[in-house]
Amino acid sequence: MRISATRCAITLAATLVLAGCTGSDSDTDEAAATGDTVTIDNCGRTVSVESPPQRVVSLNQASTEILLSLGLADRMVGTATWTDPVRENLADANAAVPRLADNKPSLETVLEANPDFVTASFGSSIGDGGAEGRDQYEKLGVPTYLSPTDNGCNGEVSSASNADGARTTPYTMDSVYREIRELAAIFGVDERGEDLIDELEGRVRAASEPVNATGVTLAYWFADTQTPYMAGCCGSSGAITTAVGATNVFADTTDEWPQVPWETVADRDPTALVLADLSRRSVDGDALDSKIAFLESDPVTAQMQAVRDRRYIIVNGADMNPTIRTVDGIEKVAAALQKWNLATPQS
């Protein structure tokens, strides 16, 4: 649904001030492009830009794909921290953007690109990480934007057992829509942002409305064959599970990616396994073929019903992170459950 063109603020648990915004969506885009100040309350920090940034560095794939989807490749001077190939529809635009690092770049590497704005999906990706990292850029006069999907943005506390922390407030696509609106406002492309949100909302409806997977249980495996990282209740995987009406077998843990013994996974015996096929190769079990080979050869995992029936739902690692790719995950899980006749149509 489009926001009113007469609004002079977006209030979505944040304060967004667009000076002098009146008229149509295209008028709003034009006004922002002329240099009106945009001020946003971003994760407890005030971010102001006097004119749309022209040299942005995005420090995570999720943030990169939003900027590319908004048609901002010509303003991007660097990207970093990739788990997967870029989404296919964005490949041509992304090819023209320098990749500073496959993983987290150093502060010096980012500064060499001479950015006037830095975005990130995770606070840990910014400089030395968290608030301190944002302070480093602020002292240098470079504004930063952190995705509202980040745990720290919602005041969640970290878990000693999981670097990704606990997420007691369930993630929903609303936080992604907020991120799109705020970035679109900062870059003066409000109408593009609303078009992107409309597209994503339509895809979610089209994938989820025909599906009712009540009674189906899922386990989401990200990586690591020894002590696997399985999705907890409330991250992107939780949003996918909710959309299709299924149950996550680890919905009883708030850690976003708890490491769980295989005996526990086997004891909960999910109907299907959602497997991340990662392009990175940092730990055993990143690649899909290594996941499947392990599942079918290990004496514990080989006894699970999902393994015996080869009920594997293949997604990209990015589909399991809070981002526009959550919609890809919903589509892939819904399609697989329908193919196996495990999801009845919604009444």
Image (cartoon, helix red, strand yellow):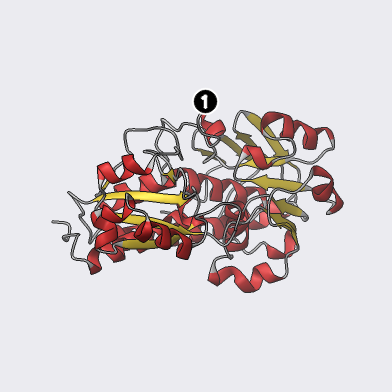
Q: Which percent across, then down, holds residue 46?
A: 67, 31
Q: Quadrant of the C terminus?
A: bottom left
- Specify the quadrant of the image occupied by residue 135: top right
Which residue is farthest front?
Answer: 299
Q: In the drawing, does residue 276 fall left or right of residue 50?
A: left
Locate residue 60, reporting x and y percent: 63, 51
Is 19 rendered above or below residue 344?
above
* Quadrant of the rendering where the N terminus is positioned: bottom left
Residue at x 80%, y 49% (from the top left corner): 110
Crowd around label 1: few <14 · some 14–19 · many ≥20 (10 Å):
few
Can residue 158 be seen? Answer: yes
- The kind of residue tagged 1 is Val
Residue identifier under label 1? 157
Task: Give the left or right position of residue 110, taking residue 172 as reference.
Answer: right
Quarter of the view holding residue 190: bottom right
Q: Position of residue 327 (x, y in %)?
A: 42, 57
Across and down, in percent, residue 133 comes to 73, 34
Q: Residue at x 58, y 42 (%)?
A: 147
Apparent side of residue 103 relative to residue 230 in the rendered image (left or right): right
Q: Secondary structure at mark 1?
A: loop
